[in-house]
Amino acid sequence: MNLYVQGKNADFRYAEGKKGLLGRTFHHFFELYLFLDGEIEYISARHKQKLSPLQLVVIPPGKYHQFVLSGDESKYKRYVITFEPEFLKDIFSGNEESVDYILSLTPSHRIACQYEYLKEIACLWSAKDFSGALTSAITDIALQIKNYNLNLQKNDGKFSELAACTMEYINTNFSKQFDLVYLADKMHCSVSSLCHEFKNNYGISIKKYMLQKRLYHARRDIMNGEKAEAVSLKYGFSSYSSFFRSFVKAFSHTPSKTGK
């Protein structure tokens, strides 16, 4: 059974199996992912963790992440709510890009009950009525998250020191121009060791991670009114044509169509 309902400001999904499982990605929206069953590992800059049933993953815009499925894919079940960051900017404000949350819930927790309620009414209510219910549910879930004791940590200790330090350096300096030789020198190791350790820990190459992160921020800046040519220089692309090709490949539209 799979459900996908689009609301006015947000989308709701209940999914079973591998279909719809996203790969290594950044995205521009908030994602509220509630894991239900199966064997899945969540990987981001902060977390490398096998999820347990009823763990809620709060993924902010611009946060690299992936879900790695193992075991019987037919057992994999989850809820996913996505919405634009402006939708709840008064609740989700501050430095959302720097953190992601994993919250452990119980079946009776108010957040878990909201997801179950949305599943029950998804096929019964009209699109307009469901959209209103989804909006109310997201607002309530967001408030619950804000009141939750997050006990945030820099990372959960499952990354190697080299990989974690490399990730931190890239996230701080991604807009600057530097190559793998320079980065390896900063980390006091060989290029091969650096690349292997990063890929082994985060499931993505350094070059691909940096490209995706730069493209995400470039798209956001263009949406905020900056010129594409200036943005391409800002994020270290060698030429506008190189930026243009990478942008179209990533987003399936040209920079001039962004936000339209």
Image: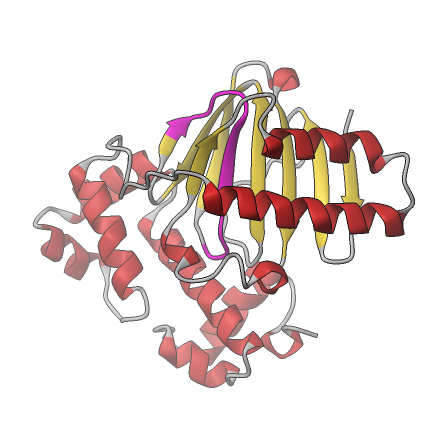
Image quadrant in which you'd find residue 106:
top right
Provide residue 98's location: percent of width, then percent of height.
36, 55
Q: Which residues are magenta?
A: 49-62
Query: Relative to residue 22, is residue 64 drawn left or right?
Result: left
> 226 or 31: nearer the eye?
31
> 92 or 34: nearer the eye?
92
Asked whether residue 61 appears in the rendered view, the answer is yes
Whether residue 254 is situated above or below residue 52 in the rendered picture: below
Provide residue 158's location: percent of width, then percent of height.
26, 30
Query: Relative to residue 201, is residue 103 drawn left or right?
Result: right
Q: Is residue 55 magenta?
A: yes
Kindly identify the residue that appears in the image at 23 percent across and 43 percent down.
164
Kindly identify the residue that appears in the image at 38 percent across and 49 percent down.
99
Provide residue 186's location: percent of width, then percent of height.
11, 57
> 244 or 8: nearer the eye?
8
Kindly identify the residue that appears in the image at 70 percent across and 74 percent down.
260
